Image (spheres, grey):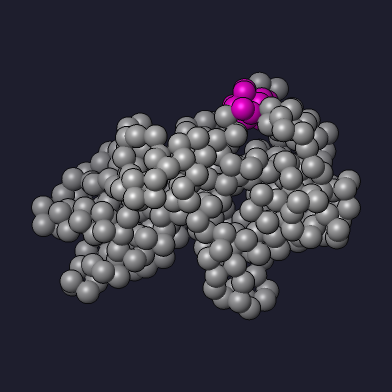
Amino acid sequence: MKTTYREAMRAAIRDALQRDDRVFLMGEDVGRYGGCFAVSLGLLEEFGPERIRDTPLSESGFVGAGIGAALGGMRPIVEIMTVNFSLLALDQILNNAATLHHMSGGQFGVPLVIRMTTGAGRQLAAQHSHSLEGWYAHIPGLRILTPAVLADARGMLWTALQDPDPVLIFEHGSLYSSAGDLPDDAGAVDIEHAAVRRPGTDVTLITYGGTLPLTLEAADTLSADGIEAEVIDLRVLRPVDDETVLASASKTHRAVVIDEGWRSGGLAAEVSARITEAAFYDLDAPVARVCSAEVPIPYAGHLEAAALPSAERVVAATRQVVRHG
């Protein structure tokens, strides 16, 4: 069936609510308004205010309530409107959700799912254009998911709700309106492994989330020039699927990491380091990175576009890596 990323996410939430009475959705404007990005539109009318709960504008408060509900046996889905607002709940996420299992000696789990929109490209200026999923991938005790395709948007949530530990799902804002075909029987998917989205032999392009479409576009452009790029969608940023990444880099002997986060101390640096540590002697060229410029994301459209990764920048970086080899 034809659907959008937004509709696939909504179907995933609906499915979880139908499957398990312990599941409920809470967050700012998720009820009567239908969600800031219309993901939960219609769910209040379908499931009622006990299970689709609007919250006050207090991320620390309602994330804390979600942690308490999870400790009490519920399966909450907490929606934080955008990733920048999650900073107001960072103490709850880092010091409570991520640590309680460890600090209780395994006596308590926190089966909590937190969803949030991430990424730039929509002229929302510096305070609403963060890509901080790499920050959260730094924290032990969390699982970090970045659905980039319809099947993952539809299928990751239910699997995440089965995890005894907290799971953060980052939905790139540019993907909500993307459309395509999704099988009528689409359901839960694996949240352990990366995926090869395009096979290739000459270079490995590693990315996730909102930069997957532009990376695939770059791969098509490179193919026209005789460079066959293999595209890896990480899907899971913590724990990273080293096996899939290293197998591809060892096969193609070259790698480029594409990440909308900032270059310094970012996820791209982590992936690059893992490849260099484990597959150094299989490489024919240094690992390259394409990241956002080291600036607060600008508001002006042309400046924002200049600051973000693009297919053209990926093509240029890849050609340089191939020439180097």
**Count of labels in the image:** 0
At 11% from the left edge and 57% from the top edge, which residue is drawn? 323
Residue 62 visible (yes or no): yes
At 17% from the left edge and 58% from the top edge, which residue is drawn? 319
Residue 246 image point, x, y percent: 33, 51
At 60% from the left edge and 44% from the top edge, which residue is drawn? 116
Q: What stretch is highlighted in magenta?
A: 88-101
Where the N terminus falls, by quadrant? bottom right
Residue 300 image point, x, y percent: 39, 45
Image: 301 above or below 73: below
The answer to whether 41 appears left or right of 72 in the picture is left
> From this viewpoint, which residue is outermost toward the bottom?
1
The answer to whether 161 appears left or right of 54 in the picture is left
Where the C terminus falls, by quadrant? bottom left
Residue 306 image point, x, y percent: 31, 48
> From this viewpoint, which residue is outermost toward the left?
324
At 34% from the left edge and 50% from the top edge, which residue is drawn? 302
The answer to whether 47 appears left or right of 117 in the picture is right
Q: Is the magenta stretch mostly helix, strand or loop?
A: helix
Does the magenta-highlighted stretch encompass residue 91? yes
Q: Please state which of residues 85 and 234 is positioned toward the viewer in this rendering.
A: 85
Residue 264 image point, x, y percent: 32, 32
Residue 253 visible (yes or no): no
Does the magenta-highlighted stretch encompass residue 163? no
